[in-house]
Amino acid sequence: MELPGGLAMADLGDDRDGLALDQLHVPLGPVLPEWPSGLVVDVVLQGDVIQEARSRFVDLDDLDATERLPAAARALESAARVLALAGWDGPAARARGLRDAVLFGGGSSAGVLEELDDLRRRVRRSRLLRWMLRSAEGGRSEVLGALDDKLLSARAAVAGGRGEAPVAVDLAALDARLVGAEFAAARLIVAVADPLPQPALTRPTDLGGAS
């Protein structure tokens, strides 16, 4: 049964405490601020907890330029998304400024490396960032670790090193990370995962009980 405007009515299901709560089917994406281009995540919510998640990419033949960035620029863009979603706008803008320097040659490599090192130190030492990541709860360390990996990856690429960039999370792994998380943390989890829009990673999105 549908409500006006095509919205599905909530179903009932048992939550983790054995209580019967409404189940809501909510699509996230493909157009959200600080969201991977073309990504859609269909989630089932009970209360504010994600019970099921199915991710997919749309419009794979028309990928956003962000997904074709070189390694250093992509790592910096991904770090900027995480910082922006955490609410730390200054360092997010700084990461994007470094991304642009990598892409368009603004400044020397030595200057970019110095800026990267300074940004990384600030991220690692910031109590404010840890407070801003309170929605991530138990995943806070994972977010901070992922941020450090992204900045290290960018540094290695700028320096011409051969260190491998962090492997992008596939859609199945992203879904697994989302299940059990609070809805407020969903966008942050997606930003940290930074999944790639590869056709091999797409799959059906039917959710159990979805209408």
Image (cartoon, rainbow, N blue to C red):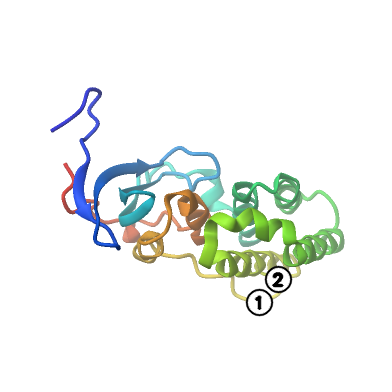
Give the numbered dot on residue 156: 2
Q: Quadrant of residue 63 in the image?
A: top left
- Asked if disc 2 and disc 1 are in contact, CB closer than 8 Å, the reply is yes
Give the numbered dot on residue 97: none
Q: Is residue 73 visible?
A: no
Q: Residue at x 53, y 59 (%)?
A: 136
Q: Nearer the viewer, mark 2 or mark 1?
A: 2
Observer-nearest residue: 157 or 6?
A: 6
Q: Residue at x 35, y 61 (%)?
A: 179
Residue 84: x, y in percent?
A: 64, 47
- Image position of 20 with respect to 123: above or below: above
Left or right of residue 67, residue 175 in this image: left
Residue 148: x, y in percent?
A: 66, 68
Left or right of residue 144, residue 10 in this image: left
> Quarter holding the C terminus?
top left
Q: Quadrant of residue 74 in the image?
A: bottom right
Task: Name, please, the residue furthest toward the top.
Answer: 4
**Disc 1: which residue:** 162
Alpha carbons under labels 2 and 1: distance apart: 7 Å
Q: Is residue 51 visible?
A: yes
Q: Which badge, 2 or 1, comes first in the chain's sequence?
A: 2
The residue carrying pointer 2 sits among few (fewer than 14), some (14 to 19) or many (20 or more) residues within 10 Å by Cα, namely some
Q: Label 1 is placed on what type of residue?
A: Arg
Residue 185: x, y in percent?
A: 49, 53
Q: Label 2 is placed on what type of residue?
A: Ala
